[in-house]
Structure formats: C-alpha cells, structure tokens
Image (spheres, helix red, strand yellow):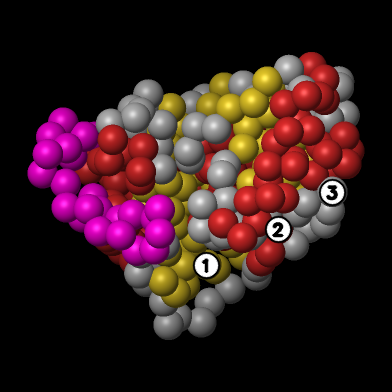
C-alpha cells in the first residue's frame, strides 16, 4: 500500500471509530442546519478534526480541502479532499448508510482514495494505476452490458431544487429503461458500490469535490467510466457526475442529456 494511502486509511478508521461511538447514543447529537436539507453535527466536526490531525502529523505542509473547515492556507502539490461523514442525514436518523471519504490529489489529479463504511467495517481503497480494492480483495465493475439490465443509483438534487424538473425527467426515463433505481443517500459510498459491482451505474447533480473524488477514482480503477453529465472530465469542478460500466456509460449519458 502506498504510504499516502496508508495514512488515509489510518485517518478514515480513526474517524469511523468516532462515528460508531456516537451512533450508540444518537439522542446526544447536536444537529445544526447549514442550508436547506443540509445538516451538520458535532460528530462531523470531530471526525474531520481527527482526520486532519492524522494528516498534519505526517504531512504538515500538505494542503487540505475539507467539508466543514474549508480549504487550508498551505500551498502544496498535494491536497487532501475530505468528507468526514458523507450521509449525515442518514446518520442522524440511524439509517446505516454513511461513510468517511478521503482523497489525495497530486497536482490536481486524484492519486489515492479511501471510502470507509464504519457500520459494516468495509474499507474501499484505490490508487491511480494500481487498481481498486475492498479490504484486501481486488474489485471490478460489473459486466452489465445494457442499461435495461442495470441497477442505477442516484441522489436527489436537494441543494439545487431549481433542477428538480430535469432530475424528474432523468429519473422517469431511467425508471422505464433500467432494471431498477436506488437512492441510498451517500454519494461516496454509491460510487464505491459501482466500483465493487453492487450497482451498475450512478449519477447525481450538485455535489462537492469531497463527495466524489475518492469514489470516482475507485470506479475508474475498477474498470468503469466517470464524467460529468456529458461524459467530460470536469465533474469535480462542475458538481455533476455520471459513472457506470463501460457498456452502460453511453446509454446513461443519453438518458441524462
């Protein structure tokens, strides 16, 4: 395992321990609304602080982009992109679908990624050019050949309700032309599931880089394709992402256009 990936794993597991302890007594959660339908708890912040502490001890000069604390002031070739608790709303309600997501970018390109599901103790990892793994087992996207046979994941555009009409149009088409749809509520974990072959495709609009960076690398390293809704590579900046098996990807893009 690459040294940077090893640090990301250590940080993700430490954050997962904080999350799991807090899940034992959700009555103690302090919930604050950041924006409409967008929440944060003291556990998001504690998880993020633990991740940053691990990174800073190993690489104090690296830059950090984190969901709760924003961008650090460091100028560096390396940037850590952190979502300390992707699926906060699920966590608040005790719905066991949430994760820690950490990506390491080198000169703007995602080089390593970790998605850790603390409820199942599942660790998804990837390094550019070295493949994607679930724990110690190599994973690949499914062999699904057609959209009509695909299980498709999505996320509601809850931060961009002005795009709900477009989303409903996309969803209607995919409901009619796929094997089924799922909305679980944690984009990073959804992307990891595409990488592991548990879903065949995924799309969502209005995301942030920390929602996508690690999971997108996993899909690519597992043999899948990732782009924005037009299939172009600028999804981290645009905030819209589509991911699928190679044979399903073109049909997915047509459905989203």
Asked if disc 3 and disc 1 are in contact, CB closer than 8 Å, the reply is no
Near mark 2 (Cα within 10 A), the count class, few <14, some 14-19 or many ≥20, is many
Single out the residue that lies furthest toward the front: 165
Near mark 1 (Cα within 10 A), the count class, few <14, some 14-19 or many ≥20, is many
Dot 3 corresponds to which residue? 257
Dot 1 corresponds to which residue? 79
Query: Which of the two discs, 2 and 1, sits closer to the camera?
Result: 2
Residue 216's place in the image compared with 133, above or below, is: below
Residue at the image position 62 percent from the left and 65 percent from the top: 106
In the figure, is residue 62 to the left or right of 230? left
The earlier-in-sequence mark between 2 and 3 is: 2
In the figure, is residue 18 to the left or right of 125? left
Residue at the image position 35 percent from the left and 46 percent from the top: 88
Q: Secondary structure at mark 2?
A: helix
The answer to whether residue 41 is magenta is: yes
The earlier-in-sequence mark between 2 and 1 is: 1
Residue 17's place in the image compared with 47, above or below, is: above
Give the CA separation, mark 2 to mark 1.
Answer: 17 Å
The image position of residue 251, as x and y in percent, is 87, 34
Q: How many labels sit on residues?
A: 3
Residue at the image position 68 percent from the left and 42 percent from the top: 168
Q: Which residues are magenta?
A: 20-43
Dot 2 corresponds to which residue? 235
The image position of residue 26, as x and y in percent, is 17, 37
């Amino acid at each position: 395992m690459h040294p940077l990936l090893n640090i990301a794993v250590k940080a993700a597991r430490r954050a997962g321990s904080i999350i799991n302890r807090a899940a034992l007594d959700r009555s103690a959660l302090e919930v604050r609304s950041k924006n409409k339908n967008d929440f944060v708890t003291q556990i998001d912040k504690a998880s993020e602080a633990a991740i940053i502490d691990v990174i800073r001890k190993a690489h104090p000069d690296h830059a950090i982009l984190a969901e709760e604390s924003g961008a650090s002031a460091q100028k560096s070739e390396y940037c850590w992109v952190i979502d300390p608790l992707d699926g906060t709303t699920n966590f608040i309600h005790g719905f066991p679908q949430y994760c820690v997501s950490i990506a390491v970018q080198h000169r703007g390109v995602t080089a390593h990624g970790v998605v850790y599901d603390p409820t199942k103790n599942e660790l998804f990892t990837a390094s550019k050019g070295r493949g994607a793994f679930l724990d110690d087992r190599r994973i690949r996207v499914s062999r699904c050949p057609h959209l009509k046979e695909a299980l498709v994941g999505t996320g509601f555009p809850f931060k961009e309700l002005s795009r709900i009409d477009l989303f409903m149009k996309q969803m209607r088409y995919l409901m009619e032309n796929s094997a089924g749809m799922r909305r679980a509520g944690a984009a990073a974990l959804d992307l990891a599931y595409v990488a592991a072959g548990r879903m065949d495709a995924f799309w969502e609009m209005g995301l942030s880089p920390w929602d996508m960076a690690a999971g997108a690398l996993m899909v690519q390293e597992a043999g899948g394709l990732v782009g924005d809704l037009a299939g172009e590579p600028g999804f981290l900046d645009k905030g819209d992402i589509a991911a699928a098996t190679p044979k399903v990807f073109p049909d997915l893009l047509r459905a989203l256009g």
